[in-house]
Image (cartoon, rainbow, N blue to C red):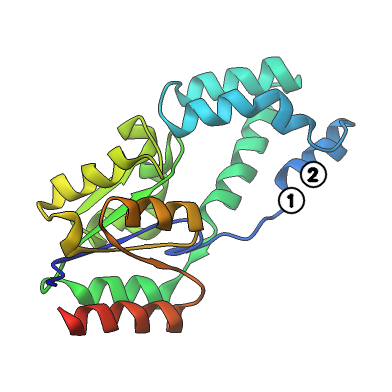
Amino acid sequence: MVIRAVVFDIGGVLEVTPDLGLDRRWETRLGLPDGEILARMRDVWRGGSIGTITLDDVHEALGDRLGLDDQKVAQYMADLWREYLGTANTELIEYARRLRPRYRTGIVSNSFVGAREREQAAYGFEDLVEEIVYSHEAGFSKPDPRIYALICTRLDVPPGEMVFLDDAEACVAGARDVGIHAVRYQDNAQVITEIEELLARS
């Protein structure tokens, strides 16, 4: 076994993204029952995650479906991006940086329209790794096998020569199904140890 590439997820891995209760707070503010925002916006969130709609479409839907004026749409989106971006997992970001140039590095993220620009501004991910595959740009999301194939193609590395790190079991399983060495993120020490063990055996 030879490992030539290490690929990272973003949310819950390179970013610490706790649930800040965005929808619950806004449902209380708007007098809506629990779960109502998701019920009304589910197809919009899905469309945004695979790039079938634009950010302008999202803003329009928030106005039409939740009755928000332009100011409240802006406030809601500011809260959404604050929750989405979380804070930097500095230790793991620095670990990813140290892997280069010995290993090729990449990111595969189930994302949302507008994420690339905001994450670049906040964390500089485009400077951290060689290739980033965002679901909203690719048109499909993990655990679709096509998204793993895409990062393999972009990094020019076959699945068996790649390690992939994710915090979601379904996404880890999807990577393993296509032959990638996948590690489930629990904490920094655990995952760095597991990756280093794989690298040491290659």
From the top left corner, tell me how far across and down residue 72 is, in percent. Answer: 70, 30
Question: In the figure, residue 92 lies in which quadrant?
Answer: bottom left
Residue shown at the point (66%, 36%) measured from the top left: 76
For the residues bearing labels 2 and 1, Cβ distance under 8 angstroms: yes
158 sits to left or right of 97 = left
108 sits to left or right of 101 = right
Residue shown at the point (22%, 77%) measured from the top left: 98
From the top left corner, tell me how far across and down residue 115 is, in percent. Answer: 42, 42
Q: Residues within 10 Å of mark 2 (few under 14, many from 20)?
A: some
- Describe the element under mark 2 as helix, strand or loop: helix
Q: Which residue in the protein does label 1 denote?
A: 21
The front one of 15 and 79 is 15
Question: In the figure, residue 113 lies in which quadrant?
Answer: top left
Residue shown at the point (35%, 80%) measured from the top left: 194
The front one of 123 and 186 is 186
Q: What quarter of the picture does the N terminus occupy?
A: bottom left
Q: Which residue in the protein does label 2 denote?
A: 24
- Seen in the picture, residue 183 relative to 134 is either above or below; the reply is below
Which amino acid, by three-letter code, is at mark 1?
A: Gly
From where the camera sits, is residue 116 visible? yes
From the top left corner, tell me how far across and down residue 66 is, in percent. Answer: 74, 22
Which amino acid, by three-letter code, is at mark 2?
A: Arg
Residue shown at the point (31%, 77%) measured from the top left: 195
- Seen in the picture, residue 47 relative to 85 is either above or below; the reply is above
From where the camera sits, is residue 120 visible? no
The front one of 77 and 9 is 9
Alpha carbon of mark 2 to alpha carbon of mark 1: how far? Answer: 5 Å
Q: Residue 64: which numbered mark, if any?
A: none
